[in-house]
């Protein structure tokens, strides 16, 4: 057998955006391994992607369009052809538009692929149609809003910054599960003498990387940051010269906010001892270059934006933003380097279109009117598994009068409710270009095998649907590679990278701006005080009120990425089933044993889990890792049957971590 090796990119929602070497023989992906020449991921992959060939050639891959023949949710379909499917979709949509208007059609997508073309392929199409517009805010909207409130467009530092740090706070991030290529840098920083402190809500997979573990009450991250600031000011540990030159609003914060955030009050809010809070503040002030590696988890509460805003303020008080190795590393942002209108075509939208928040899909499907949602088109997402308030989402998907189309690789929970299912390509079967949100890298990929069965990419599918609707816009006659060429040509990065090497599939480092002064705000300073916000100053905000005794943390799993990879038996086995983690004292109180089936319930619904009793989880908290598919669950619902549709204080993001439950025997 003749074998060939090609460069490619991991397409999944992970900050690392790994470079891949894909071995192909006789039209099949034989193996996938890391590309040792990638400047950030350097040749190693997570366990999920090491067996990516098992996903590409999985027996469950959808290979032809399907038409529903049974009751919604049972997954009963018959094969049809693409032309027939496109004609049926176009006919149904034309009827809906004529009767109820185009806003009665709703697209739903998020980050099942992170390629700039395939992820955003539907925007131009739905702009042209005039459909309702989806607010895609489920993940980091509050995090972005909190950062921008203080630092505007200031970029995050390169991840290698940690090598010059002497104190690293892993704050609300499980790097082993969600940012594995930061781990070697962190280990090298420790060898260089850095101390690593992990601040989180439970002792997750990353605990062994930390020299000190600080477990706080969920959602109290902003309270801890304010408490540290109080001590810094009380003990005259602030960098007054940096503040005077580069910070706006510190005096009002000091005089109007910090007096209400004493160590005692902070201890009450966070569940920490006063001595721990005071020592952390002194360690932070005493470090020459402290770096906060800031996760996204702490932004998924009712106070999520304020949590991020307050923590982003903290480095300003000690001048860390002006030091090599210091500051705050959240998500790297390179969006300003690319003219996404090339792909998204906002000019196609003839009039303002109704926004629908993706976190409130259940309400949209069941309650929205004027007009109601009459058709749902889902691509690279699985809302029946990942959207909050699963019972409401499923109730909407069960509607006989909702025409649902799902473009997917597998028969996911959502696809089972579709009227028409369209088979989608994997990342090694289409062209795309990828930028990272955990480093400053750019990589282009091209198909290395033909599409499995008659699967089509997102872009190909939208071009086909545009033609079926009678749209003769030349844009929809372009190829994916033409779009990518245009994206590169219009970007200033072309003058800073080897475009020929990029087109050969070699990863390129993007130019990274200095995150230090002047800062990317209107004033050029770090804006602790922001008059554009309802709350001009960072303040303590509580989370949602408790209505059940246990806080539910819907945390990332080590082997499942959101709901991706649930098709694979090796992944399900590695996770040892859909499990709930609980402290031994909480288990004894309820008469629950390790390994037992338990029922977790609140006002949203009930979910069955296998129980893991562990001291890694504090009293008052339970943890469910991963967004499982229902066919792998011990019951008929998964974790998002317990989460609500409430939105965050900033950014209209999800509050997936701000829910309370009770647990009992099944």
Image (tube, rainbow, N blue to C red):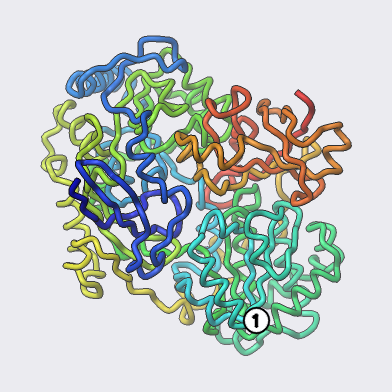
Quadrant assignment for the N terminus = top left
Is 635 on the left or on the right of 183, as rendered?
right
Is 662 on the left or on the right of 464, as rendered?
right
Q: Residue furthest front?
A: 1
Quadrant assignment for the C terminus = top right
Question: Label 1 crowding class (10 Å Cα cut-off): few <14, some 14-19, many 20+?
Answer: many
Q: Name which residue lies at 76% across and 45% down.
A: 621
Q: Name which residue lies at 20% across and 67% down.
A: 501
Residue 166 image point, x, y percent: 62, 81
Q: Name which residue lies at 67% across and 63% down.
A: 208
Whether residue 319 is visible = no
Toward the viewer: 178 or 538?
A: 178
Residue tagged by mark 1?
Answer: 318
Toward the viewer: 614 or 216?
A: 614
Is 77 on the left or on the right of 603, as rendered?
left
Residue 634 image point, x, y percent: 62, 26
- Tell me the quarter of the picture where residue 602 sits: top right
Residue 514 image point, x, y percent: 43, 79
Is 270 on the left or on the right of 23, as rendered?
right
The vertical placement of 235 against 607, above or below, is below
């Amino acid at each position: 057998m003749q074998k060939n090796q090609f460069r490619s990119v991991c397409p999944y929602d992970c900050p690392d955006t790994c470079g891949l070497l894909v071995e192909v023989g006789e039209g099949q992906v034989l193996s996938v391994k890391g590309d040792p020449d990638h400047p950030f991921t350097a040749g190693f992959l997570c366990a999920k992607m090491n067996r990516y060939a098992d996903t590409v050639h999985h027996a469950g891959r959808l290979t032809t369009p399907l038409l529903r023949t049974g009751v919604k949710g049972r997954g009963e379909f018959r094969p049809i052809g693409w032309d027939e499917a496109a004609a049926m979709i176009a006919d149904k949509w034309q009827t809906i538009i004529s009767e109820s208007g185009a806003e009665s059609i709703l697209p739903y997508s998020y980050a099942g692929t992170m390629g700039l073309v395939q992820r955003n392929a539907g925007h131009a199409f739905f702009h042209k149609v005039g459909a309702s517009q989806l607010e895609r805010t489920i993940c980091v909207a509050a995090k972005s809003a909190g950062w921008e409130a203080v630092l505007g467009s200031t970029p995050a530092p390169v991840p290698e910054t940690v090598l010059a740090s002497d104190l690293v706070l892993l704050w609300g991030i499980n790097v082993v599960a969600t940012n594995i290529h930061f781990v070697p840098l962190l280990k090298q920083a420790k060898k260089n003498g850095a101390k690593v402190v992990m601040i989180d809500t439970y002792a997750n997979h990353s605990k062994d990387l930390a020299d000190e573990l600080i477990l706080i009450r969920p959602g109290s991250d902003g309270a801890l940051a304010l408490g540290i600031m109080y001590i810094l000011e009380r003990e005259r540990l602030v960098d007054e010269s940096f503040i005077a030159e580069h910070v706006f609003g510190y005096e009002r914060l000091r005089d109007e906010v910090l007096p209400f955030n004493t160590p005692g009050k902070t201890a009450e809010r966070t569940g920490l001892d006063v001595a721990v809070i005071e020592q952390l503040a002194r360690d932070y002030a005493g470090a020459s270059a402290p770096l906060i590696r800031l996760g996204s988890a702490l932004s998924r509460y009712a106070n999520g934006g304020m949590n991020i805003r307050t923590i982003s303020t903290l480095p300003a008080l000690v001048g860390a933003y002006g030091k090599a190795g210091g500051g705050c590393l959240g998500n790297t942002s390179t969006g300003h380097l690319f003219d996404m209108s090339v792909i998204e075509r906002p000019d196609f939208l003839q009039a303002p279109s109704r926004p629908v928040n993706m976190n409130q899909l259940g309400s949209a499907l069941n309650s929205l009117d004027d007009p109601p949602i009459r058709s749902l088109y889902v691509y690279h997402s699985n809302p029946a598994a990942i959207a909050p308030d699963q019972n409401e989402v499923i109730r909407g998907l069960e509607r006989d009068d909702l025409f649902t189309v799902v473009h997917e690789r597998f028969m996911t929970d959502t696809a089972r409710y579709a009227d028409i299912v369209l088979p989608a390509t994997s990342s090694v079967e289409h062209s795309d270009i990828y930028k990272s949100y955990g480093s400053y890298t750019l990589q282009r990929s091209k198909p290395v095998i033909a599409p499995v069965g008659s699967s089509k990419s997102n872009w190909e599918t939208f071009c086909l649907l545009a033609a079926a609707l009678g749209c003769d816009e030349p844009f929809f006659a372009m190829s994916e590679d033409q779009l990518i060429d245009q994206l590169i040509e219009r970007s200033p990065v072309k003058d800073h990278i080897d475009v020929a090497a990029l087109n050969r599939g070699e990863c390129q480092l993007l130019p990274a701006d200095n995150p230090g002064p002047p800062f990317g705000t209107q004033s050029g300073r770090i804006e602790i005080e922001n008059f554009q916000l309802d709350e001009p100053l960072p303040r303590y905000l509580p989370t949602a009120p408790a209505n059940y005794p246990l806080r539910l943390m819907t945390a990332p799993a080590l082997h499942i990425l959101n709901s991706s990879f649930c098709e694979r038996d090796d992944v399900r086995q590695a996770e040892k089933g859909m499990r709930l983690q609980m402290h031994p004292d909480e288990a004894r109180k309820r008469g629950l044993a390790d390994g037992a089936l338990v029922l977790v319930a609140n006002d949203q619904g009930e979910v069955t889990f296998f129980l893991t009793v562990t001291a890694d989880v504090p009293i008052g908290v339970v943890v469910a890792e991963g967004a499982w598919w229902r066919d792998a669950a011990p019951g008929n619902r998964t974790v998002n049957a317990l989460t609500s549709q409430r939105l965050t204080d900033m950014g209209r993001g999800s509050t997936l971590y701000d829910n309370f439950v009770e647990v009992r025997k099944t």
